[in-house]
Amino acid sequence: MIFFIIIKNNSSRIKKKNFRKVGNLQLWEHLIHTLKDQKVFIDTDSGLVINKCKKLFPWVQAYQRDKKFIKLENVKNASPTLMMIKNFLKKYVTSDEEIIVTTHVTSPFIKIKTIKDAVKKLKKYDSVASVTKDFNFAWLENKKKKLVPINFNPKVITKTQNLNPIIQSNGSFFIFKKKTFMKYNNRIGKKPYYYEIKFPESVEIDNYEDLILARKICK
């Protein structure tokens, strides 16, 4: 099993998000400590991350992000994630049967025990994606800005616990074998398993409110 992580030096919604302190550690360091004794690769444009990994985290191999991916994201405002994963697989993974876990430093509370349990699902499925379930009334806004109910009938009063849950990808991890990704050029194959994770492991830091919550959890 190999872990692949992308760490950006800059971020838009929270300036230098990956380097903000959460507890006694910078955000990105929480995941690295969680993955101690695992085989970890980091693709980054941060010299700080590369140097710190060399000095403090011997289980991590951090390498410089290819300039073409930086340019693609900055100029075209597009995510080069899939291309970066393919680049990593071609350069560093020899076996088509190797299990790859892509996870994110913005999920500081994910546990290695949870990830290993999710990996077991590859016995019956070709990929695994972390999700959360939300038992609340939900609408979908269409192109005309009209809200369309998607899990309830507005004319019927229903208890929330009886609703069909809204399944949301939280991005904590995607798990697949090299051969699956190379075949579909995607982290999710044709027979995926959606693995539910719960609070606080499901906390994903996207905005300042999430950062404040993460700091409170650390306390």
Image (spheres, rainbow, N blue to C red):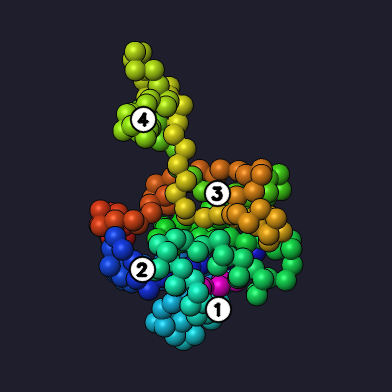
Residue 204 position within the rendered picture, expressed as x and y whole percent measured from the top left: 38, 54
Q: For the residues carrying marks 1 and 4, which lies nearer the camera in this image?
A: 4
Residue 215 position within the rendered picture, expressed as x and y whole percent measured from the top left: 28, 60
| Residue wearing tag 2 | 18
Considering the whole magenta stretch, tell me its main secondary structure: strand
User: Is 106 located above or below residue 169 in the figure?
Assistant: below
Precedes in sequence: disc 3 or disc 4: 3
Q: What is the secondary structure assignment of the residue under circle 3?
A: strand
Picture quarter with the C terminus: bottom left
Q: Image check: 102 left or right of 19?
A: right
| Residue wearing tag 3 | 129
At x 62%, y 44%, the residue is: 192
| Residue wearing tag 1 | 61
At x 41%, y 78%, the residue is: 46
Residue 174 position within the rendered picture, expressed as x and y whole percent measured from the top left: 55, 54
Type of amino acid at the residue the image marks with label 3 = Ala
Precedes in sequence: disc 4 or disc 2: 2
Where, by quadrant of the figure, is residue 155 drawn? Answer: top left
Disc sitting over residue 139 in the figure: 4
Residue 181 position within the rendered picture, expressed as x and y whole percent measured from the top left: 65, 57
* CA distance for labels 1 and 4: 43 Å
- Comparing 19 with 215, the one in front is 19
Type of amino acid at the residue the image marks with label 1 = Gln
